[in-house]
Image (spheres, rainbow, N blue to C red):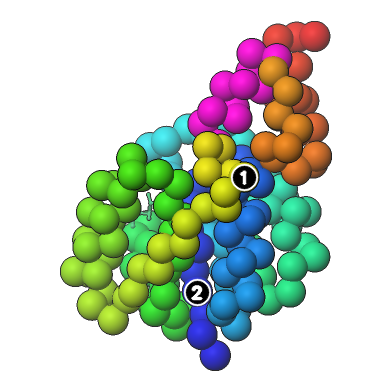
Amino acid sequence: MTIAIYPGSFDPVTNGHINLIERAARVFDHVVVAVAMNSQKQGLFAVEERLDLLHAVTGGIAGVEVDSFEGLLVDYVRRRGARVVIRGLRAVSDFEYEFQMAHMNHKLYPELETVFMVTGADEFYISSQLVKEVARLGGCVDGLVPPAVRDALSAKFRGARGT
Ligand code: PNS
């Protein structure tokens, strides 16, 4: 059974992530969507909130599990008995960081393979960062994130604006 770990911040999960998760689930026996906990980086959503949203939007995809991890990704991947990490590539601008990370992870865990999947043609311009900015400034995020995430974003920013 091939287990693939799909790590990320998922702050929050977007339609780009979901497209990738659906496609990965068709290729691998089991896909673990793993939210990285990073005490140095304050996200908009708490890790628990990100996990709840991921559970809500991936619940219908067979073979997908949602989890979180702290510390090095390679240690988590080893613990899970996996050797495959999936990452999405949107554009050339993603490449340098992804290339460095794949080599670093390979150095730390030589049996590990990073498998890159290109983001869907309709989602390549979507990033959690941009979605948050659009939502914060009151723009429409329909089609960029699932309805549950849209509602969670609007609750966050409504709270922040006190409206
Ligand atoms: O969604 P992101 O922010 O691009 O995901 C980056 C992530 C979480 C995959 C990366 O920062 C990571 O693996 N963090 C865990 C800590 C770690 O292993 N760092 C060394 C990476 S070479």
Magenta extent: 127-138
**For mark 2, what is the residue?**
4
Quadrant of the image for the C terminus? Answer: top right
Instruction: State left or right for residue 54 relative to residue 78.
Output: right
Residue 76 shown in magenta: no
Tally of marks = 2
Horizontal relation, residue 122 to residue 91: left or right: right
Q: Is residue 129 magenta?
A: yes
What's the residue type where badge 1 is placed? Asp
The label nearer to you, 1 versus 2, is: 1
Q: Secondary structure at mark 2?
A: strand
* Ligand 1 within 8 Å of the CB at mark 2: no
Q: Which residue is mark 1?
A: 122
> Crowdedness of circle 1 by 10 Å Cα count: few (<14), some, many (20+)?
few
Q: Residue at x 49, y 69 (%)?
A: 5
Residue 22: horizontal and vertical position, in percent?
A: 66, 64
Residue at position x 32%, y 76% in the image? 112
Q: Residue furthest bottom?
A: 1
Residue type at numbered disc 2: Ala
| Mark toward the start of the polypeptide (1 vs 2) | 2
Residue 9 visible, this orientation:
yes
Alpha carbon separation for disc pair 1 and 2: 24 Å
Q: Residue at x 71, y 29 (%)?
A: 141
